[in-house]
Image (cartoon, coloured by chain):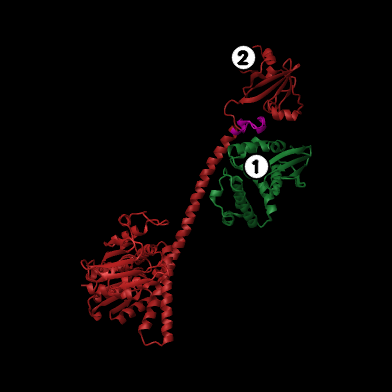
Chain colours: A red, B green
Amino acid sequence: MLSLTLSESELGKLFPFHLRLRADLSVIGTGPSLRRMFPALAADDHLFDHFQPADSRSGIRLGELVANADMLTLRDRGGAATLGGQVIARGDEFFLALNLLDVPGQPDIQSLQISDFVACDPAVSRLLLGPVHDALVAESLSVSRELGMERARVIDIMNRTGRLAGFLGHDFANFLSIIDLNARLLERGAPLDERQKRCVEAIIETASRGAVLTRQLMHLSGAKEETGLAISPDRVIKEHEALFQLVIGPQNPLSLELSAPSAVIVASEAGFVASMVNLLVNARDATAGHGGIRISTSHGRDVEALIISVRDWGSGMAENVRLRAFEPFFSTKAAGNGLGLPAVRAFVEGLKGNISIATAENIGTTVEMAIPLRLPDGAYTSGVTTQKSAATQSVLVVEDEEFALEGVVDLLSATGFTAIGVLSGEDAVERLRRSNFDVLLTDVVLGGMTGIDLARMAQAEQPGIRVIFMSGFAPDPQMIADDCPYLQKPIKPNQLIDLVGNAARTSV
Amino acid sequence: MYGMIHRALQAMVVEEFGPEAWDAVSMAAKVGPAELVSAVVYPDEVTLRIIQASAFRSGRAEEEFLRRFGAFWVRFAEQCPYGDIMDFTGRDIRTFIGNLDRMHFAVVDLMPGAKVPSFALTEDTRDQLRVRYRSPRTGLEAMVLGLLEGLLDRFGIEGEVTAVAGINEGAEFLINLAVEGSEC
């Protein structure tokens, strides 16, 4: 037998609803929770003044049952609660170690206290579950809202930053155009001494680097890449020779055999450069960084197309690899993602061209792209330009930035075109009513009417006129008809001259 | 610590200094709405970053900030949906402090993972209570002092809380009660 002496407080913690009774069932003492729940229960009261048996077994001669039974269930006469527990008889006293079993209605923590339960009673967790659950549900709604607002705020900041970048890029592109055009005019003008030539070269070079930054800003703004742009692959390849050399590595000789200097295709320059980079990366990996890579261009023999090929003398491909080379996600490289060649094919086929691979193991690989040459009006050409007198080619230039207008007009005039410049769409309409022009070269964003609206009016007024758009932004392709090429600023003078020349030759 | 602590920190910063202040705090502490889920247990360094950033924003020393936060925490817990749990824990200061460990035990049972402190009334006289505080964490004694002050406010008791010398893994606090007219 174990003997243990506990204080009232300790007894109260262990058995918060306990009852100590005399042999006659009168109350000696109660637990703290019993006192709190039944304040009318007082010492010397009889048990049955306040409680009754909760079941028939407990009801059978309760006195005897209390003396002999282990378990007892009581319900208070006010209907507030059901208590149950064990009976311990000691001498002429009974100790009822009762627990709260049930509270009628919905028992909740507002009517109870945690000390109504013994330590670690799982009933406590059950009681807390309701409020905790309700609180978490309410909070989850609040957190969802906060997360949504946070996301919207971040998106808004990014959009505004992007828009700002776009506007800055647009304006910067305009300024670079002016700087570049005027520098080139200086270059073409009166003879320059060596120092002056260096200055002009520095201006042109810096403007070109600024153009790269501008394009990055435009990309940040989410502006689409230029579309509908007539580019000379030979010139683009030459301009990016340093980049291509960097891609294949300094130990890998890069040779260029460019035989189509006047061939023009209508494509995104960024897409073309990206495709070339993809092909060069593959060639580099096949050559393990040395062995040499050649880029060549030539006119197609059977179709009027430009052939652009990338040749390496590397490991080549097995036939089963060649057959799967354009399959998305297929790669023989450990770190390859298998997306490069499929992207190049998509680019070429988007231009109505085709791409092929000739390869042999340990011999090397040639990837050949055949891209149809196109004029702005969609007709094919051999790519050889006819020599038409520039003096008969008249161009109406519309640009609301005065220095930019001057630069373009001066450049075209110096090249031999008859170029007239106006600062607004409204002035252009006036001119179109008075004189015929071969080409309308207009900024898209003007002060009053837009370049798009001007183009429509011009074509209505002079159906044979060719239209070329220019802007710092890339427009939605649906806004521009197929036969209206688009120049993205900063304008490259040679691109401008080629486009205007081609357009003027095909005007009616 | 539970995200509920983070929510309380946010509420205090917003109440005292406005929502922009909280934006600054959350940026400095590198936290966002994902760190404010009450039932989630976050690494202590996250809570510490928020406390440090909030203290800095408030222009107060960290200890002073923690003390004010301890008192604020009691008000915060009362008003939020967990307020019923406060009453369930105890409707007088002695019962409340005496039942804190039980309440923490039950909460951890429902939302496991947290390391919770322990409180015990080691001395209980008419005009003085001695509270033993133990925690696996160090450095939060100032918050506990504020929390006990907050409990005095909650139960409408005039009194003063002082920290006595720290003991291993915790501290002891004396609550001197103004006996006349107080209902403890």
Q: Secondary structure at mark 1?
A: loop
Tell me what residue is drawn at x 32 percent, y 77 percent: A421
Q: Secondary structure at mark 2?
A: helix
Which quadrant would residue B94 be assigned to in this image?
Answer: top right
Which residue bears the numbered disc 1?
B116
Tell me what residue is drawn at x 49 percent, y 55 percent: A153
Q: Nearer the viewer, residue A5 or A105?
A: A5
Which residue bears the numbered disc 2?
A57
Amino acid identity at mark 1: Val
The image shows residue A305 at horizontal and vertical percentages of 24, 67
Q: Circle 1 marks a residue in which chain?
A: B
Q: Quadrant of the C terminus of chain B?
A: top right
Q: Circle 2 marks a residue in which chain?
A: A
- State the count of labels: 2
Q: Nearer the viewer, residue A464 or A5?
A: A5
Residue segment shown in magenta: A109-125
Crowdedness near tag 2: few (<14), some (14–19) or many (≥20) residues, C-alpha within 10 Å: some
Amino acid identity at mark 2: Arg
Which quadrant would residue A243 be assigned to in this image?
Answer: bottom left
Q: Is residue B182 above or below residue A369?
A: above
Q: Is residue A231 above or below residue B74?
A: below
Crowdedness near tag 1: few (<14), some (14–19) or many (≥20) residues, C-alpha within 10 Å: some
